[in-house]
Amino acid sequence: MSIQFQRKTGTHGRDIDMDWATFGLTRRPFRPTPDTGAYVPTAGHDAAFTAIVRAFADGDAAACVRGEPGTGKTLLGLRFLESIPADTQRVMLHAPPDTRAVDLLQAVLFDLGKPYQGLSEQELRLAVHGELLTGLANGQCVVLVVDEAHHLTPEAGEELRLLGNLESKDAKAVFALLLGLPGEERLSAAFRQRIAVRKPLVSLDRDEAVRFVRHQLRECGGRPEWLIDDEALHLLADHTGGVPRVLNRAAALAFEVAANAGQKHTDAEAVLDALDQLGLASAEQLSPAVLPLTAPPDPKPTAKKATKRKTA
């Protein structure tokens, strides 16, 4: 079926639901689901994005992006879909464990708005091939993004290879973008040979993590230099491992801690509390000494720290 993002909860199984206007923000930053408006250009993400766009423009059959959980693979796939012409037909499949060929075929028909229920596997295959060949005759290439591609069964991988065989003298009927964890997908050697681009995604370095947090706040109408201390940014960057998903959770919770304490900015104490609650580091493990950021810090006003906080 088409990819769907389930609503995630905050710490201890509850949603982080607060009035972000307290911090002068127009909407919530640090969202738990992929948000292309929060995309932060980094060397690794931009290199992968450029390679995907080039492979699509060149008429290649497939591209692959691998990365650990939370590094931004889904976000990259969504950003790519936003970059292609609006009239391009597209399918985005979130592959659950052991996704079979029939699941893949049903997902393609579902996202193309075609009947898919009550059909045998061969009928599904013929219907998909018919739709793709019709599009090809009209100069259209269908973009198929498979998230969690490492869950594809070998038979589903073989089905992708067969779809990749649909081509004319000048173009292919399908461009497949595979997003998954590091390691080899369960694909046939014949299909792996069709993958023109393989790009890894890694965690953000310290400067990128700092820019990530600041960018999120700016995109929501905030002034980072007023809303979060450099010391707090440093702690977030170091103790979340630079993983965007973890960084989002920790930053959101730190702002909630600050709001509960009646503050309109977030400091190191709020971040320490959030990291402790998330099990990323205990107060005893965290050093009070904070090294300066490599990136030039934003100017900020002097702000008092709260002496006592409520536990979020």
Image (spheres, rainbow, N blue to C red):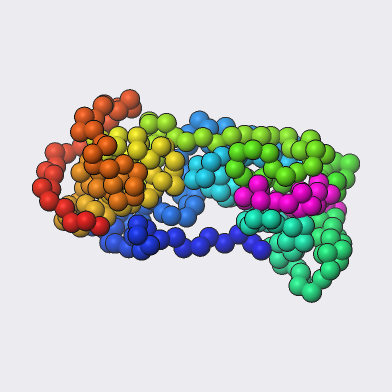
Between 58 and 6, the one lying in front of the other is 6
Residue farthest along the front direction in this orientation: 284
Image coords of residue 119 (percent x, y):
82, 71
- Res 218 seen here: no
Is 39 a magenta residue?
Answer: no
Q: Is residue 10 above or below residue 41?
A: below
User: Where, quadrant-wise, is the N terminus in this rendering?
Assistant: bottom right
Which span is picked out in magenta? 134-163
Q: Residue at x 25, y 57 (%)?
A: 312
Locate residue 43 relative to residue 265 in the image: left or right.
right
| Residue sitting at x 80%, y 38% | 189
Answer with the quarter of the image where residue 240 lies.
top left
Could you tell me residue 123's position as x and y percent? 86, 66
In percent of width and height, residue 97 lies at: 64, 55
Tell me the quarter of the picture where residue 51 sits: top right
Query: Residue reaching furthest bottom?
Result: 118
Give the residue at x 70% y 51%: 152
Left or right of 187? Residue 296 is left
Q: Is residue 155 inside the magenta stretch?
A: yes
Q: Position of residue 100 (x, y in %)?
A: 74, 57
- At 60% from the left and 38% from the top, the residue drawn is 182
